Amino acid sequence: MVISMKVCLGGTFYPFHKGHKKLLRKAFQMAGEDGSVFIGVTSAAMAKNKGKIASFQQRKRAIELFLSEENVLKQALIQPLSDKFGPTIQGDFEAIIVSPETKPTAEEINQKRKQQRKKPLQIIIVPFVLAEDNQPISSTRIRKKEIDENGTVLPQD
C-alpha cells in the first residue's frame, strides 16, 4: 500500500539554497508518489522587510526548475502567501514541513486548527543544513555574502 499525504510548507525561498532543497525533498518524500505538496511563497509585500528580494515569479521559477529536476513538479502547487499562515488553518493538509526556525509558526497553526476543531498537522522538522563553518545555511547569510547557496564560506575583504 502506498501512503500519500497532503503536505505543506512555506517560505521566501530567496536566495534559493541547499537548505530549501532539503525541505522540499522532505516534503515530497512525505507526500509519497500520489500525494501533493502545497508550497507557499511569500508575496512581495510580505517579504519587503527582508531587503532586496527577487519577484514572486522569479522565486517560483527557481522552485519549479528544481522540482522538475527532481521529477515531482506535477505534485506541487506553488502559490503566494499574504500572511504567515496561508491556507494551513482552513486547508485539508496532514503535515507541515518546517526548519527549527519556523517550528513556532507550525505550533501556532496547530493551535488555530484546534480552535476550529480541525485535526492538527503533523509537524516535521528538517534540521538546518550547515555551511562549511558549521553554521546554518540561511538566505540572510547568503545576502550578506558570508556564504554561497551551497554553504561555501566566501572570502571577506
Image (spheres, rainbow, N blue to C red):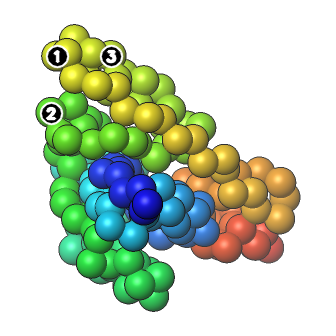
Nearer-the-camera pick, 103 or 45: 103
The label shown at residue 111 is 3
Asked if disc 2 and disc 3 are in contact, CB closer than 8 Å, the reply is: no
Asked if disc 1 and disc 3 are in contact, CB closer than 8 Å, the reply is: no
Q: Residue type at mark 2? A: Gln
Nearer-the-camera pick, 138 or 6: 6
**Residue 16 relative to residue 49: left or right:** right
From the image, tell me which residue sits under label 2. 90
Element class at badge 2: loop
Asked if disc 2 and disc 1 are in contact, CB closer than 8 Å, the reply is: yes
What residue do we see at 20% from left, 41% from top? 92
The reply to whether residue 17 is visible in this rendering is: yes
Q: Position of residue 101 (x, y in %)?
A: 55, 37
Q: Quadrant of the N terminus?
A: bottom left
Give the alpha-carbon distance from disc 2 to disc 1, as whole Å.
Answer: 9 Å
The reply to whether residue 20 is visible in this rendering is: no
**Residue 152 relative to residue 83: left or right:** right
Q: Position of residue 114 (x, y in %)?
A: 27, 15
Is the residue marked by circle 1 packed among few (<14), some (14-19), or many (20+) residues within 10 Å? few
Q: Residue type at mark 1? A: Gln
Q: Position of residue 9 (x, y in %)?
A: 37, 50
From the image, tell me which residue sits under label 1. 116
What residue do we see at 22% from left, 11% from top? 115
Give the alpha-carbon distance from disc 1 to disc 3, as whole Å.
Answer: 9 Å
Numbered disc total: 3
Give the alpha-carbon distance from disc 2 to disc 3, as whole Å.
Answer: 12 Å
What residue do we see at 47% from left, 35% from top? 123
Q: Quadrant of residue 19?
A: bottom right
